[in-house]
Amino acid sequence: MSVIKADQNIDARYGFLRARHGQANPQANGYRLGRFFEREQRVILSVLDQTHGPFLDVACGSGLMLAPLLDKGHTVYGLDFNKEGCTAAAQNGLTIVRGDAFQMPFSDQTLGQIINCQFLNQQPSQQTQCFIEEGARVLKSGGQLIILWRHARSLIHKTSHSIFTFLDKFTGQPPFPQYEHPIQEIRGFASTVGLKIKHEAVTLPFLKPDTMTVKNLSSNIIGASFFIVLEKP
């Protein structure tokens, strides 16, 4: 499948989800369960430095992941190329910049915290590397690039993805692309542009705590998403 065709499928899929669930529902952003979104949101917020802004959600969709910051008076920027997604995120309180994650419309060293959730699995490796390079460019010194993406090789994810892909085909919904990005690949891209690995983990869809270490063998069975915090020196 071409990148353009994949992007068209993604836009169509998210449009269907927003129409079905409403723009204030995490399921409009592709989460099958609201409580799974809440777990991953806790993980993101636990490492976010709220004293070092501005804040940007890249590929923000409906803009729900950083919504708790709005209640604390922070300005949160949302970047997305999808027009309807931008409209939904603006209605949810984000300051929207419509644009390309691979050519971010921000000047060098202007942002303190960038998050990106469940986007890399929709992108091939070349685009993923470009995104990380752009993140490094626009971050201030001491800023963080926080990325969360599906652990596509874990047993629980492969099983659930196969089931939902079958159901999507049966109901005629556009498919989600599924590019695999081992965490070693992301580490390599980060190192190339001088970003330091501050923290990494694998999120869990259930049980406590919300994450486990990447080295834990169980992560290859019940791991939901990779999670990495990269810091610009």
Image: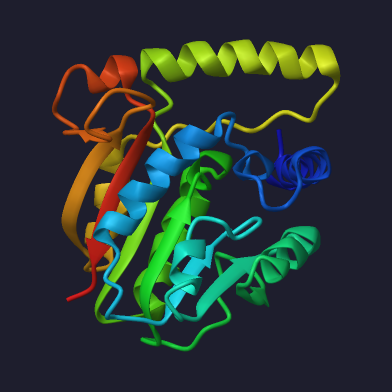
Question: x, y (%) of residue 226?
Answer: 33, 38
Q: Is residue 24 left or right of residue 47?
A: right
Find residue 183 and report its image quarter. Answer: top left
| Vertical comparison of 140 with 162: above or below | below
Q: Is residue 211 left or right of residue 33?
A: left
Q: Is residue 224 left or right of residue 200?
A: right
Q: Is residue 124 left or right of residue 52?
A: right
Find residue 32 and report its image quarter. Answer: top right
Question: x, y (%) of residue 14?
Answer: 74, 44
Q: Residue at x 32, y 18 (%)?
A: 222
Quadrant containing the N terminus is top right
Work out whether residue 91 or residue 172 is closer to the camera in this orientation and state it: 91
Work out whether residue 25 or residue 57 is closer to the camera in this orientation and state it: 25
Colour setup of the view? rainbow
Q: Residue lying furthest front in this view?
A: 71
Q: Residue at x 79, y 64 (%)?
A: 83
Q: Residue at x 47, y 50 (%)?
A: 117
Find residue 167 and report its image quarter. Answer: top right
